[in-house]
Amino acid sequence: MQSKLRQHIEEIVSLTDEEFEFVHSHFTHRKAKKRDLLIQEGKSVKHVYFVVSGLLKLLYNDSSGKEHIVSFAMEDWWESDFLAFYSKNNATLSLQCVEDTEVYCITLEDYQNLCAGLQKMEHFFLEKANRGHIGSQQRIISFLTLNASERYEHLLHRHPALLQRVPKTLIASYLGVSRETLSRLIS
Amino acid sequence: MQSKLRQHIEEIVSLTDEEFEFVHSHFTHRKAKKRDLLIQEGKSVKHVYFVVSGLLKLLYNDSSGKEHIVSFAMEDWWESDFLAFYSKNNATLSLQCVEDTEVYCITLEDYQNLCAGLQKMEHFFLEKANRGHIGSQQRIISFLTLNASERYEHLLHRHPALLQRVPKTLIASYLGVSRETLSRLIS
DNA sequence: CCCAAATTGTGACATTCATCACACACTTCA
DNA sequence: TGAAGTGTGTGATGAATGTCACAATTTGGG
């Protein structure tokens, strides 16, 4: 399944076999089960993860113990607590499997070596970071301009498959509404 | 004042005089007055802007004609409608001067040439994009976890000077509350 | 210096949404 | 197969916030 990672990277930059071998040597592979934690709040963040299959949720626990979903990470997504990862601080977020999930993992050191050793990969990660930034900005706009019902419709339109895969409680947490309100919006 | 740009870049990567000259040659310089539009919704987006002095607002106009502030861009910030800029689509956002503002401007072509010609700059922009992504994610978390009053306190804590510089109406628009509600929160 | 525009505060009321409580179906797994 | 956990719907209620209206004050430009 290493071809999944290669195929994903080659959507942005093309690689020779040797180059991909070099890239691949910087990653480790891991399988995790539903409910496993890849990143745990308060602990150090060793990796950025590339999701080969399965589904992750990136979440923040507020002071009253409520869980808020910052992001879902589906197949072909890169995810981590990036603030903690780059700054080497402890995680303020957690990253947990919603389904059994298969990931590639890269440490900060390997990430830096990879970028330094192959300019194409620095370019690739720049593209990814830009898209991530744009995606987050779109989400901010949806909070500024849409009410709960409209945010649901918007998500339904952009990620119809997601709503089949995850419980409504998680969708509500992602949209920033209570599960009861979401339930009433749908019915 | 080109030293302002150099100083900013050198916080992340060091440059020789020749390298900075190369970097600088990719930018143009512009002064704009309060209320001038650097980016106008519906038109093409020619540049990313680096703010030397002054203050910009990045805003979205919703279907009912209300204005929502996606971001402020202060001194040393990079701003654009990045989605439109990279994809060469027309702007969905506008970028407008809140004060008289001085910026450096770079086109997509020059941006790509600069990254290709000097790896350090690709690295610099990667750092910036990552920080932008992280910043947007923090803002999402504030929408998920804080009420209007807490979001105001949070902003007050992070950018105390901003509240002195801009009318409360704009702060309200940035926080995602009506100006009346913000007025009542403060008093 | 003066007028128009911008900014801010505040009352009255409507709407959205959260919270608490409970019921019920469905899964999971020992 | 039975018990515990998980997911979902819904009623009652209150809190948070938006909307509309109006007045007072400040600012900016000619």
Image: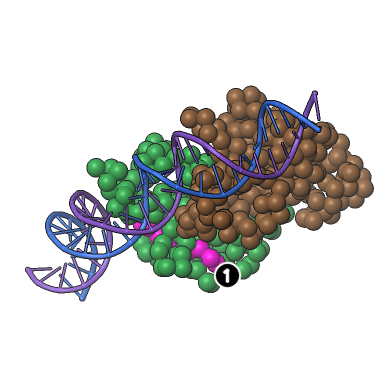
Chain colours: A green, B brown, C blue, D purple
- In the rendered image, residue B38, in percent from the top left (x then y), is placed at 71, 31
Q: Chain of mark 1?
A: A
Residue A147 falls within the magenta-colored stretch: no
B68 in relation to B12, above or below:
above
- Residue sitting at the far right: B17
Q: Which residues are magenta?
A: A90-100
Query: Which residue is located at x 84 percent, y 41 percent?
Result: B23
- In the rendered image, residue A12, in percent from the top left (x then y), is placed at 60, 39
Neighbour class for label 1 at 10 Å: few (<14), some, many (≥20)? some
Q: Main SS of the magenta segment?
A: loop
How many marks are shown on the rendered structure?
1
Residue placed most toward the observer, B126 or B169? B169
A27 displayed left or right of A153: right
Name which residue type carries label 1. Asn
- Read off the residue under disc 1: A90
* Picture quadrant where residue B91 is located: top right
